[in-house]
Amino acid sequence: MEDSGRMRDGDQPTFRYSSNPTMFSSQPIMTVFVVGLSIVGVALWVMKLGPFIVGPMLVAFSAMIVCSWALSALSYRLYVTDDSVVSERGLLSRSKTRVAIASIRSVSVRQSLTDRMFNVGTVSVSTIGDEPEIVARGMPEPAKLEALLRN
């Protein structure tokens, strides 16, 4: 690292924060629904109640929802280095948004009651303009991230 704070080629950035969105704690009601659906599906399947295909279909549907959540969580990453905030999106193709910390004008955190219970939230980072450059939903410890960006 040079004295100016800029990185030379080959230097690795220092991560002050790095996280993916949470899977289950950011959607607790849907989590309860999916777990309940899985339990009902397994019960129908094992106890042979109703048409045979209903139980396995409920279990498969629940598994597809969980896989969708996992892919969604794994395909987004937010990290803060010494001089920038970076939002990366995508698994096969990548989209990256980088905002210099010096140019940040506002940081906002939005949390519902359940978000506060599970310590997750939506963090928005804005520079100049009406629309935020980065909106990260379901991020763990949003107050820590906000404090990091404000200092």
Image (spheres, rainbow, N blue to C red):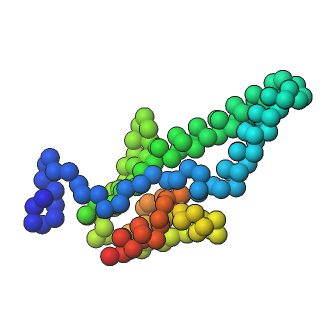
- Compared with 33, 118 (above or below) is below
Residue 20, given in percent of the width and then of the height, sits at 45, 51
Residue visible at 59% across and 51% down in the picture: 24
Residue visible at 58% across and 69% down in the picture: 116
Q: Is residue 57 left or right of residue 137?
A: right
Q: Is residue 3 left or right of residue 104?
A: left
The answer to whether residue 129 shows anywhere in this view is no
- Compared with 86, 53 (above or below) is above
Toward which corner of the image does residue 15 lie, by quadrant? bottom left
Q: Nearer the viewer, residue 141 or 138?
A: 141
Q: Residue furthest front?
A: 47
**The N terminus lies in quadrant:** bottom left
Q: Nearer the viewer, residue 95 or 75?
A: 75
Residue 96, given in percent of the width and then of the height, sits at 37, 49
**Disc count in the image?**
0
Residue 132, given in percent of the width and then of the height, sits at 46, 65
Toward which corner of the image does residue 111 lie, by quadrant? bottom right
- Compared with 98, 92 (above or below) is above
**The C terminus lies in quadrant:** bottom left
Residue visible at 65% across and 35% down in the picture: 63
Residue 50, given in percent of the width and then of the height, sits at 90, 28
Residue visible at 49% across and 59% down in the picture: 139
Q: Is residue 3 left or right of residue 129?
A: left
Q: Residue furthest right?
A: 50
Q: Nearer the viewer, residue 132 or 80?
A: 80
The answer to whether residue 24 shows anywhere in this view is yes
- Compared with 103, 20 (above or below) is above
Q: Residue furthest left?
A: 3
